[in-house]
Image: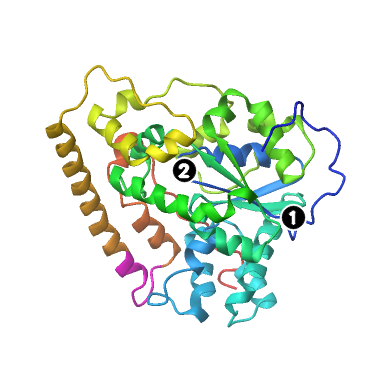
Amino acid sequence: MSRPNSPRSMPPPQSPDPDRAPIFIVGSGRSGTSLLRAMLNAHPRVHLLQESAFHTWTEMPGRWVDGARRLEFYYRSFSFAWLGLDPEELRAIFPAPVPREQLPQVYRAIMRRVAERHGKPRFGDKNPMSTVYLDRIFAGFPDARVVRMVRDPRGMLASFAGMPFPSPSIVFWGLLSRRGGRKLAPFLDRILTIRMEDLMADPRGTMAAVLDFVDEPWDDAVLDHPRHLVPDDGPPFPWAADAYEPLRVRNPSWPRRLTPAQIRLIERLNRPLMRQFAYPPADLPAEPGARQMARAVAADVAREAAYLWRAARMVRRLFGRPPADAAEAQRLLFGLNPAVREHHPDWSLPDPPALPGAGR
């Protein structure tokens, strides 16, 4: 999509119906999705949820949660708890059992209620994992506006080291990137793709393109998002703190944080994406040899095996009898990467807020 020469300051001639055209931000984690959400939420007409994870919970395989219970399982999740909504109000509108075809209406009601709480007519959600649920999104919201964020995969994977729950595996993320590409392919003509590097280097031009795509008028507030943050807008996680600070272009840190073998492994596994978005190969002082590459792959596989063992323990407890409550489920998820303590040694995990109306 071509960018406008200057930001549009007049309202669009035909503003979309918010119920028909919610805004979704997708893309890999650590690709700038939180930053774009913060900038869009500074707009006086837009509020997007902070990773409601609606599809992640309601699309659980049937062996774990049967169809009739998926929505109730979501209402008990920490993802829902952080939204600050009362599930009883939603149950009153959508009494159980909610058929699968009615789930988009529930999702719409959740997004709309949170946006109304902030006085905004346009609503939506930011969730990197929604990339694999685009078929569900467009089936439920045919006029949805989907913005996809991409980032140099070397910077993205180096950044994952400071996260408590994503897999640390370079191989895993390379394979997931290819799967995400296949999921995106049928919808590319309906999606706006933005590079994080472009958003950082040219915020005005990039945000003009985004607002034009979602059919909202230009507002200078999107360039000063730290002044327009709303309180209690999602969990206070330190790895997302940069998204709420003033924009400043930094030199990439991945050349210092990754070994030469890791850099070349990432480049090989993500070659299609790097070529498509003009990320050049690194200029290394010396090329890693075959033994170095083999050791890098072996170490990566070992890290992934340990991660999968912890994940299996989490899943068994998450779906046990009785099932884990929201606080325990969150602690299990955020314990998948113990190395996060090296990056955030003084941080303690806050429990999700109690559901409104709990105990009445």
Q: How far apart are marks 2 and 1 (CA)?
A: 24 Å
Quadrant for the N terminus, please: top right
Q: Nearer the viewer, residue 255 or 358?
A: 255
In the displayed structure, 284 sits above or below 157; it is: above
Which quarter of the figure has residue 54?
A: bottom right
Principal secondary structure, stretch drawn in magenta: loop
Image vertical order of residue 255 relative to residue 296, above or below:
above
**Is residue 323 covered in magenta?**
yes
- Left or right of 332? Residue 200 is right
**As shown in the figure, which amino acid type bears the numbered disc 1?**
Glu
Q: Is mark 2 on a helix, strand or loop?
A: loop
Pick the residue in front: 185 or 214. Answer: 185
Q: Residues within 10 Å of mark 2 (few under 14, many from 20)?
A: few
Q: Residue at x 72, y 49 (%)?
A: 118
Q: What stretch is highlighted in magenta?
A: 315-324
Most foreground residue, 104 or 275? 275
Q: Position of residue 52 (x, y in %)?
A: 55, 57
Task: Determine which residue is flagged by label 1.
Answer: 116
Identify the residue shown where x is 65% and y is 42%: 230
Name the residue that disc number 2 marks. 237
Question: Which residue occupies 52% across, 81% down?
Answer: 68
247 to the left or right of 115: left
Task: Examine the image and state in which quarter residue 238 appears.
Answer: top left
Rendering coords of residue 2 (x, y %): 68, 34
Q: Can residue 155 be seen in this view?
A: yes
Q: Residue at x 26, y 57 (%)?
A: 308
